[in-house]
Amino acid sequence: MLSLVLLQAAAVGLAKLGAGVGAGLASIGAGIGIGNIGGHAMEAIARQPEMASNIRINMIIIAALVEGVAFFALVVCLL
Amino acid sequence: MKMDQKFTHMRNVYSLSMLSTIVLGYLAISLVVLILCPVDKCNFFITFSVACIVLSAYDMNFFPFYLKALKKSAQSVARYYMIQMLLRFLLSGILAVLGGLILKDYIKVYLLSFCAFFLLTLVCESILFVYFEKKSMKPKVINNLLLLCLIFLMGMVPLNSIAGEGDGNNKINVQELVMEHTNDAHEWHITTIHGNSISIPLPIIVKSSSGWHVFMSSKFEEAENCAHDDLFINKDGKICEKNASGVEQRVLDISITKDVLQLWVVVILLIIIFLYCAHWYKHKKPEDEAPKGFVGFMEMFVMFVYNDVIKETIDEKHYKFFAPYLLTVFFFVFLCNILGLIPIFPGGANLTGNIAITFFLAMCTMLLVNVFGSKTYWKDIFWPDVPWWLKAPVPLLPVIEFFGVFTKPFALMIRLFANIFGGHAVAISLSCVIFTTFQLSIVKGATISPISVVLMIFMDLLEVLVAFLQAFVFTILSSVFIGLAHQEEEKPQTEIIK
């Protein structure tokens, strides 16, 4: 009974806490994803330096896609 | 003999230029202070003059040491310059603090003017130093010393913020400031001097129940309670009217707002740039020389997008049709992003960070992809080449593919909007850090502010990269989607492999 009242009083704070946690998790996901892409791209360039430019362009495209997903989460958290 | 003549010549040039800078600078700063600020003239000017004289005496008296160091080696000259600058900085600090203690009321004006004087003499001295030392010293040493100069300059930046807003006002609300700078507005606010805001009023064009109203947004401010002609601004900042039953109702609003004006500026700039470049090519034959300068740079840029993005992703038969749209989108987004980083008119409106603009661009891409998609493309959406149990009786994959038609441009829209809006929000928040820390205490403010300035410079450079990158990604993804809509059907392999 008391906890319900407390929860009601803390509703606004809880919303902000949720938003913060969501944004943080989204950032972790984006970091892991882009780090993976970058790492594999580095290995590929090390194996075959003459394809560096090709690999770089693909890496940038995929990084932008992954970051787009993270931004979805960020926008949802902001709202 | 020659060395002595050279030294005399040097000493004369040095003394003359330093003296003239000092005198001119002092006069200029005093004039500005006289006109702009209401100060207690006697007290302030006496303190300011004394401080300037002390600093100038310090500057002018260092020449013999400079000559002595010059006779030894280039290394010692560099060392001399560094020691001299350090002592100068300390001396100015002491003078600033003393002056501030004496003038308790006009401390801001005094600090500002002393700062200006210090900077002026610093710049003049550095120029002289480089001018004299260009031949004998290695460029690396000179660059290091100039970098030191720059760092000292940056340390002065926080003092400027003392004289700005935030003194005596309420607490700075960072979120409100960020929203104010990134949202659309009915006037273009340029700056605020002494509480009067200087802004460009823009026309408001609305259609309410009583017909069309066209007027300048300055009329909204003149009337009380921001009302004019039965129209008023509600708490969300939108224009409303009270209809017959007294209920607030939005009106049809097609005013020229800040974003619209910025859009026109971008369009005009694009037209000027590209028509100028195109005109250069008009009377040249393919055998002539390649263009140099600005036209050469634009050609390099356009051919980079054309060759590496458009030709790669769209097949031979169709790329010429879609190339104009994709190139336009790339340069429009890039120029919008770059102009959004300039803090003053005619830049600075947050255009691509406005979701309506990115929505329109994404919608254009969606229309282009789907209206001109080949039959194969639509067949792949509604009846793809997959096992039968994914297509019927419950059309799983067709529904997913159909949603994909909408989610891909939606992702384009959100990606561009969030990247640019986020960049602007972070830059504004970092600059608010200066104001909020100064409100806590001047000491905290002065220590945090150089870090904030460095962070802001870094953020701005990152945003330039993001501006280009987001334009590039938008274009390449659009062209990939267009290319995917024009794939040829896979022909069955009929060649015999020998």
Image (cartoon, rainbow, N blue to C red):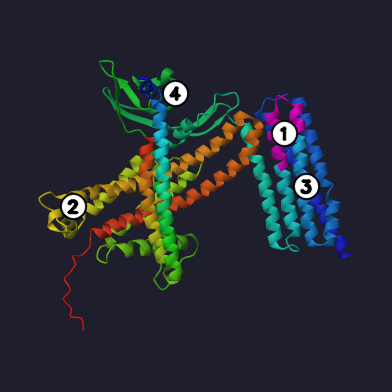
Q: Nearer the viewer, residue B344 or A17?
A: A17
Secondary element type, mark 1: helix
Name the kind of residue labelled 1 in the image: Ser
Q: Position of residue B445 (x, y in %)?
A: 63, 34
Mark 3: which secondary structure?
A: helix
Magenta stretch: dominant secondary structure: helix
Residue denoted by label 1:
B30
Looking at the picture, which amino acid does disc 4 mark?
A: Glu
Q: What segment carries the magenta color?
A: B96-118
Q: Which residue is mark 3?
A: B18
Report whether residue B352 is seen: no
Q: CA distance from mark 1 to mark 3?
A: 18 Å
Residue at numbered disc 2: B397
Q: Residues within 10 Å of mark 3 (few under 14, many from 20)?
A: some
Between discs 1 and 4, the one toward the N terminus: 1
Residue B224 vertical position relative to residue B309 in the rendered view, above or below: above
Q: Earlier in the sequence, mark 4 or mark 2?
A: 4
**Residue B91 part of the magenta-drawn span:** no
Please name the residue shown 61% across and 39% down the image.
B449
Q: Are marks 1 and 2 on the same chain?
A: yes
